Image (cartoon, rainbow, N blue to C red):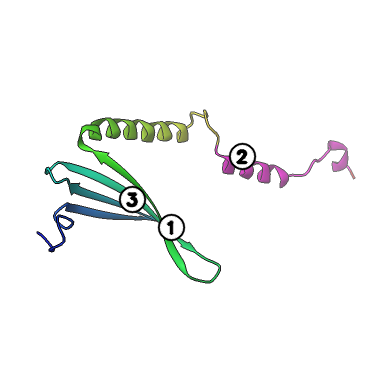
Amino acid sequence: MSDGHGDSVRDDIFSKAVRAGKRTYFFDVKSTRGNDLYLTITESKKRFHDDGKHSYEKHKLFLYKEDFEKFADGFEEAIEKIKTIREGDNEFIDPADEEQETTQEKEYTDVKFEDLDS
């Protein structure tokens, strides 16, 4: 697979786009000139400008084969921690949850028992 411009086409092995709300994540498997494989993970977000035009803000992470297992272990551990926190381990409290509780508290009025006889 060559396009006449060197190895630029040959190094693309696999690509998967995952749309997630306002973001798109791209998982791209590529090969080096030495035929080693690596992964790039790109986060892309559409940004709108005041003039009505848009552009894409991209952040890219390169992950090499010698780091795959350690990266996967760290990723899984972080996801499990998030699940644990969300299941009731209140080590961290979501500010949105606190705001909702405050709003709910404001819905009630202070009633005194003496007011019930009036």
Q: Earlier in the sequence, mark 2 or mark 3?
A: 3
Of badges 1 and 2, nearer the viewer stands 1
Q: Amino acid at mark 2?
A: Glu
- Residue farthest front in this picture: 5
Task: Judge whether 32 appears above or below 67 on screen.
Answer: below
Q: Residue at x 27, y 40 (%)?
A: 63
Q: Of the numbered discs in the image, which one, if any, rests on residue 112?
A: none
Q: In which image quadrant can residue 22 be found?
A: bottom left
- Residue farthest bottom in this picture: 52
Of badges 2 and 3, nearer the viewer stands 3
Q: Amino acid at mark 1?
A: Lys
Q: Of the numbered discs in the image, which one, if any, rests on residue 98?
A: 2
Is 101 magenta? The answer is: yes
Task: Judge whether 5 appears above or below 72 on screen.
Answer: below
Work out how far the residue at label 1 is from the one at label 2, CA to CA, in angstroms.
Answer: 25 Å
Magenta residues, start to end: 94-117
Task: Judge whether 56 appears above or below 32 on screen.
Answer: below
